[in-house]
Image: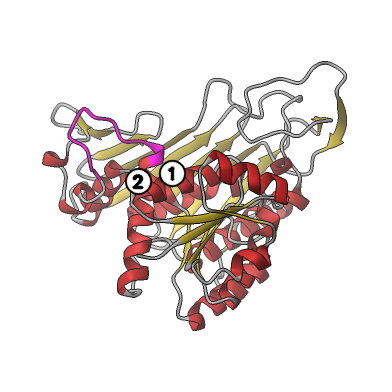
Amino acid sequence: MATAAVIGTGFIGPVHIEALRRLGITVRGVLASTAEKSQRAAQRWQLPRAYRSLDELLADSEVDVVHITSPNRFHYEHAVQALQAGKHVICEKPLALNSQQSSDLVRRAQTCGKVCAVCYNIRYYPLCQEARHRIAQGQIGRIFHVLGSYQQDWLLFPTDYNWRVLASEGGAARAVGDIGTHWLDLVSFLLGQAVVSVCADLRTIWPKRRRPLGSTETFQTKFQAAGSFEEVPIDTEDFAAILLRFADGTPGMLAVSQVTAGAKNRLLWEIAGEKGALAWNSERPDELWCGFRDQPNQLLLRDPALLSASARACADYPGGHNEGFPDTFKQLFRAIYAAIEQGPTHPASYPTFEDGHREVVLCEAILQSHQQRRWVDISINV
């Protein structure tokens, strides 16, 4: 069994560690932004190694797989160095800050002989897998259109601040890149169709935000005391409205917001077809709504006994025993580590660097559309 090391100790790093341990995969150590933070993290999670530098981590011959959960601006650099060191790479999205970097990573992935994956974990909710199966089997017929949103409220106030709000830190497309790409990847996965054209309108609700003088964490719940901040100009969007066209001509609409009060982490998609419709809400992940014109609507509760084989493979608990966000990482890593042990297959059973590159290209096209006030076609070059 391959052994892992994790770069990053913020919100998502511990999620990786927990999921890996649930699968019985050894986590060798962790690397934080400083040696002191690495030591504290290793002690907190009872890990053997607290790495003082990336070089030290990559020189560890017992590490086979590097999980990159560092801030976005480091993803490209960390992935390049990990591949050069002969490690398998599992990278949080975005794969890179721009398409030049992400295309370079795709080329490296194509020749390195290693598994190179991106963490689009939402694919692995069992009822999303079920929806993909039903659509592929033609159970809702020809697709008419797709509607959806991804909304949060953790940046609702001008006093809410995180490194992600700066283009230099998180990328030029913030709300779209941070959460919108999850929706775009998921719906493309459900339909089996890539987005080929976009028309977007972006809005920065708070042109200035108040940066606390101390450090902050993603999704923090503590509020800063009055006066303990400085105002910072914001160059990324809080909201996006996007028209979409998929490869087979299916139209779609997506709204992305990180300033919707009460929406804690709500990804919603609705797919309308000639025989019926399907809808799913990530805040109620064990429910799949099935709509009909000529019979009563149905609400399918996640139960392995009622799911297709592909969806059942991602459902480890009986019906009525909820599976949620942490379980999607477990299922994602299960697929990735199977490929590490058995060898990659084509097509891959997990999101690859190619998928990560496509989402970076999509973000750039969405920004271009907004800036030029027009439809922009997607061109994927490597």
Magenta stretch, main secondary structure, is: loop
- Residue sitting nearer the eye, 106 or 69: 69
Q: Is residue 69 left or right of residue 52?
A: left
What kind of residue is marked 2? Arg
Which residue is at the front of the view, 140 or 347? Answer: 347
Q: Residues within 10 Å of mark 1 (few under 14, many from 20)?
A: some
Identify the residue shown where x is 56% and y is 31%: 152
Residue that badge 2 annotates: 22
Residue at numbered disc 1: 18
- In the depicted structure, whether residue 365 falls above or below residue 327: below
Q: Secondary structure at mark 1?
A: helix
- For residue 6, side relative to residue 81 (left or right): left
Q: Position of residue 346 (x, y in %)?
A: 33, 75
Q: Where is residue 18 drawn, in percent x and y?
A: 43, 44
Q: Nearer the viewer, residue 260 or 117?
A: 117
Farthest residue, direction top: 226
Looking at the image, which is closer to me, 132 or 145? 132
Magenta stretch bounds = 315-326
Mark 2, secondary structure of its residue: helix
Give the residue at x 58% y 60%.
95
**Gap in angstroms between the C-alphas marked 2 and 1:** 6 Å
Q: Residue at x 40, y 59 (%)?
A: 249
Name the residue at 40% across, 51% down.
20
Contact check, label 2 and label 1, Cβ < 8 Å: yes
Give residue 191's position: percent from left, percent from top. 34, 54
Determine if the magenta segment contains residue 324.
Answer: yes
